[in-house]
Amino acid sequence: MTAPSLRQFPTPKRSNSQSRLGIVKLGVGSLLALALVAALSAQGQPDRSKPPSLGPVPQLKLPTIQKRALSNGVPVWLVEAHEVPLVQVTLLLKSGSSDDAAGKYGLASLTAAMLDEGAGSRSALEIADEIDFLAADLATNSSFDASAVRLGVPVARLSQALSVMADVTLRPTFPDAELERVRQERLTDLLQARDDAATVAAMAFARQLFGPSHRYGTGAVGTATTIKDFTASDLKSFHAAAYQPANATLIVVGDLTADSVMPQLEKQFGSWRAGSTAPGHTTVPMAPQPAQRQIVLVDMPGAEQSQVRIGWVGVPRSAPDYFPLQVLNTILGGSFTSRLNQNLREEHGYSYGASSRFDMRLSAGAFQAAAGVQTDKTADALREFFKELKGIASPVGAEELAKAKNYVALSFPGEFETITDLTAHLEEMAVYKLPDTYFSQYIANVQAVTAAAVQKAAATYIQPDKFAVVVVGDRKAIEAGVRALNVAPLRTQTVDEVVP
């Protein structure tokens, strides 16, 4: 719909009395404004020499998690949220890409992607049409640690939508035509990834750090070779092994009660029975740390920027130093005012943004610092990266520590604004076996972090002398400068060698 123009709605004429009234109103308004300015002047100018002090940290009060179970033993976690007439339902399976067998990397991801491409008596298009008709949203996906089917729907349409969700979860048909289409989409994505320096850097860094035989050394979607080889039979076998009641948790958040929703869940999922074998889980071993610093330069001729990734093997989600690490990373590269971003972006202008993060999974993922930097400043940027990575080992001042803790604490309640947000945190609790009070105590645990704990975490988990370094960019333009730094042995690779 086109917005109306001013010509369509001309300003109505005013009578003389209306005009005089307007003048009177304007005069009164002006007098009030002058009076306000005079009052403020009498009080003195505001102090702009320092920012206003922060108010108290808000308390996060989460609703109670009601825990029930279906007749077949599937746990049901329910949180009532009556602000809007919507409900979010997640069926969480505690199997993911970490459970892919060697030579089958990408199987969990492809299985999840194919769930809604035909299920029960419905085709892919029929599933999509019915979900649209119900004003619902249905998504399927898989991470390294879990797989999930997520449904968002108005409460009034929940019963019908659950029927579709149950078919998609329990009775997928994996039709050959849809499998071939999804296969070609994934192969195309991998082909296009070769032209994106940031994607190549992510793949190269994982391969450099973990190696090709470790599960974390290859992306969740697998490789072109494995994607080409998967059959419908492979997907059915993974589904039969992983998608079982003993491996599942139902999470429900929304405008309903346990008494109203449990019969509906029982109707759709209560008859779900275990397979012939119990679901198995693969414990991903922690990869060995690099013995010394090393640099890999991946040649991408004509790249507009250099993509830099620096780091080593980090920690699992269960790390006892989780809260000190959150504060430490906020200081180093986890916020806009972090040291890395202030250095590379604000002070030197080498990058639009620099950051760091710990990728915490059931097993230890990577710690990495990252940025896309100007090609002609690649060597200079690396120098500044290592300046900050070494500098974080020094004691953190009281002001910087308080700033980082407030950043984490003040932003945390915003992660629970919607029922989708709340559901995501409940999923995290289920996958990583966090206690029910975990998020209610989160802010207090952040505020309890001391400077000594941050310094100890930095000394333990950030050791730049052993870090792997990956730079993706135009070799002709950057190799000489990077070698001249003389910070580590350097070897070069092609894109073909790092995008499997």
Image (spheres, rainbow, N blue to C red):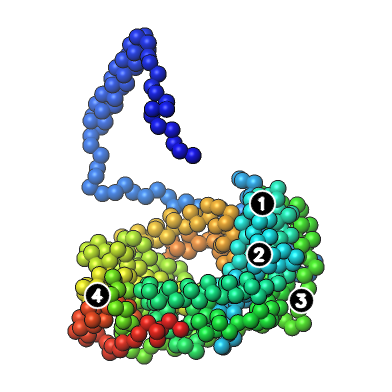
Foreground: disc 3 or disc 1: 1
Q: How far is mark 2 from mark 4, CA to CA?
A: 47 Å
Q: How far is mark 3 from mark 1, CA to CA?
A: 32 Å
Residue at image position (42%, 26%) is 9
Q: Mark 1 falls on what kind of element? A: helix
**Sequence order check, earlier mark of 3 and 1:** 1
Q: Which residue is mark 3?
A: 274
Residue at image position (71%, 60%) is 164
Q: Mark 3 falls on what kind of element? A: loop
- Give 468 or 126, whichever is nearer the viewer: 126
Residue at image position (60%, 70%) is 113
**Sequence order check, earlier mark of 3 and 2:** 2
Q: Which residue is mark 1?
A: 133
Residue type of the residue flagged with mark 1: Phe
Where is residue 333? Give x, y as percent: 35, 67
Q: Which residue is mark 2?
A: 124
Q: Is residue 258 left or right of residue 351?
A: right
Callout 2–callout 4 Cβ contact below 8 Å: no
